[in-house]
Amino acid sequence: MRTSAVSAIVAARKMTGTCRMTTQQTIGFIGFGAMASRMGDNLKKAGYALVAYTPSGKGGDGSTPFLPSPADVAKKADIVLVCVPDDEALAAAMYGENGALAGMHENQLLLNTSSVSPEATDALQKAGEEKGISVIDCPVSGSTPEAEAGALVVLAGGDDALIARAQPVFDCIGKTTVHAGPSGSGARLKLVINGIMGAGLAAVAETIAYGLAAGLDRSMLFDALGEVAVISPHHKRKIRAAKDGDFTPQFPTRLMQKDMRLLLDAGARLAVPMPTMAATTQQLSLTRRAAANEDYSALIGVMEHIVANDA
């Protein structure tokens, strides 16, 4: 199925109190960190049962049963939802005798919400297809506040029938589902969105550094940027926190830097020149060295330290 740009927009679905189950179902989470556990909370509120697997055997608030392997989760669940940090974690969770695919049955639904490379996405789709498993790549746009509120934007790749099967789950974790196109389209759209997010933050950080170096009052500068229309609501939230030196992770630097690296690689494979994304990746690599587990907006703090000569 090929979805045009117009139909992709039309396919975007707003949640209007439709989070529901048609029958009692169990969602099996592979990965249950900050984002996944919040998605799980909203699914539990809708009546879904949960089981989970993480390498540490821990996650969430302790109320969700953890099983010994991804395969065990897949056997127990009606729907498997994967939320892991990178290609390597996805491969470890999906393949092999203890991987989720080993425990899944034909026509079972596998929702991959992880932000991973197009190549890893396509490989999982192919592996699922060989076993008759229905795979949707459906990364989400939004950070922990949106995950907690059930207000993520789900970026789904797959055919219409598969998206319809998964829609009740998507309605519980998100406010909007964008049908990006055939399998793999969700993963590729996620790289586009995160590239814009990362480059926008880098521009904010650099221009704040200039303003401070030029002698502008710090408090006035941060407050002024919260008032102007040229800065997105997402970046305004980052600026407000950065003013107080608060880089509590909503989207950790290590994950944003990873997504920028994936975007650069994907662009290079298609011979797309991306000098802005390359520079942003370098800035986030520096920030990852300094603050890997803090919010990616720690780049603002890094730039502030540089111009204050105390880096």
Image (tube, helix red, strand yellow):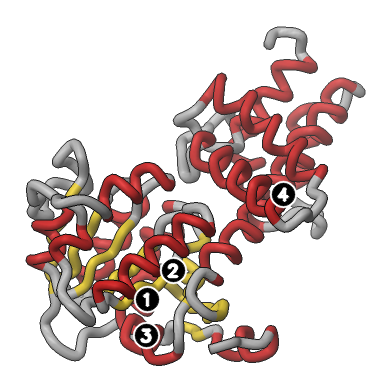
Q: Position of residue 42 (x, y in %)?
A: 28, 67
Check disc 1 and report the residue beneath it.
170
Check disc 2 and report the residue beneath it.
138
Outermost residue on the front side: it is: 130
Front label number (2 vs 1): 2
Q: Which of marks 4 and 1 is nearer the N terminus?
A: 1
Q: Position of residue 4 (x, y in %)?
A: 66, 87
In this view, 214 is above or below 229: above
Disc 3 secondary structure class: helix
In this view, 249 is above or below 197: above
Mark 2 in CB contact with mark 4 (< 8 angstroms): no
Disc 1 secondary structure class: helix
Outermost residue on the right side: it is: 214
Q: Position of residue 262 (x, y in %)?
A: 59, 47
Q: What residue type is labelled 2?
A: Cys
Outermost residue on the top side: it is: 310
Mark 4 in CB contact with mark 3 (< 8 angstroms): no
**Separation of marks 2 and 4 at Cα, in angstroms:** 23 Å
Horizontal arrangement in the rendering, residue 29 relative to residue 298 (left or right)? left
Where does the C terminus fall, quadrant-wise? top right
**Separation of marks 2 and 3 at Cα, in angstroms:** 11 Å
Disc 2 secondary structure class: loop
Q: Circle 1: is it few (<14), some (14-19), or many (20+) Cα within 10 Å? A: many
**119 vs 146, nearest the viewer:** 119
Q: Position of residue 163 (x, y in %)?
A: 40, 84
Check disc 4 and report the residue beneath it.
268
Q: Earlier in the sequence, mark 2 or mark 1?
A: 2
Q: What residue type is labelled 4?
A: Ala
Q: Earlier in the sequence, mark 1 or mark 3?
A: 3
Residue at image point 8% right, 51% down: 67
Check disc 3 and report the residue beneath it.
162
Q: What residue type is labelled 1?
A: Phe
